[in-house]
Amino acid sequence: MINDRFKNSWFYKPISFTGRFIDFPSAFAGAVIMGVIVGYINRKFGAWPASTAAMKQAAYTFLFGGMLTKLLYIIAGKIPGKITSTIISALIVSIITVVLVYAVHSMKGTPMPLESTIPTAILAPFGFSFLAWRKQAQK
């Protein structure tokens, strides 16, 4: 039995993998998947440029993808109707994501910025739609 005075202390609280601003499980999965895809796309330019592009994509996806997933949850929670909220929230967050990914890859270091953005433009709407639908199902 744990003493009552320790129940509210910092070392008693269980570890949570959901942050206030970042959805860590989604961020990590997206970072690995998108980093590998972008590295593969840029492989013909050599290991260093391909790894630079892959790491930029992975870092972006982890930080901003995790934050945009939280934004998706907020938007999906505010709009009534399961289908409407899924479509609108996924569309808004997908557009933001594609624009930011292209901006990151347009910075020096990525040999093929447009081609590195295409996987995000294709996969983001499906991924965000799935997450928004799942969030609506939990309501």
Image (cartoon, rainbow, N blue to C red):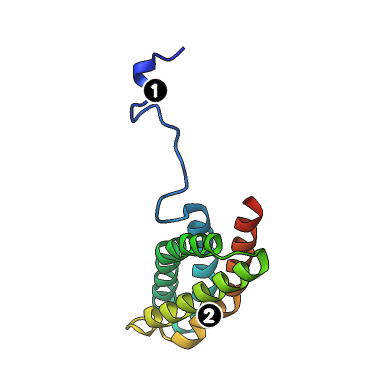
Residue at left offset 55%, top offset 70%:
89
Q: Is residue 138 left or right of residue 56?
A: right
Q: Which mark is residue 41?
A: 2
Label 1: element kind: loop
Most foreground residue, 121 or 74 = 74
Determine which of the numbered discs, if any, sits on residue 7 in the image. 1
Residue at 64% in and 62% down: 133
Tell me what residue is drawn at x 41 percent, y 68 percent.
60
Above or below, 43 against 80 in this view is below
Q: Residues within 10 Å of mark 2 (few under 14, many from 20)?
A: some
Q: Earlier in the sequence, mark 2 or mark 1?
A: 1
Instruction: Give the secondary structure at mark 2.
Output: helix
Asked whether residue 41 is in view, the answer is yes
Q: Amino acid at mark 2?
A: Ile
* Residue type highlighted by circle 1: Lys
The residues tagged by marks 2 and 1 sit, at their Cα atoms, a distance apart of 50 Å
Percent position of residue 44, x then y: 50, 83
Q: Is residue 107 left or right of residue 116?
A: left
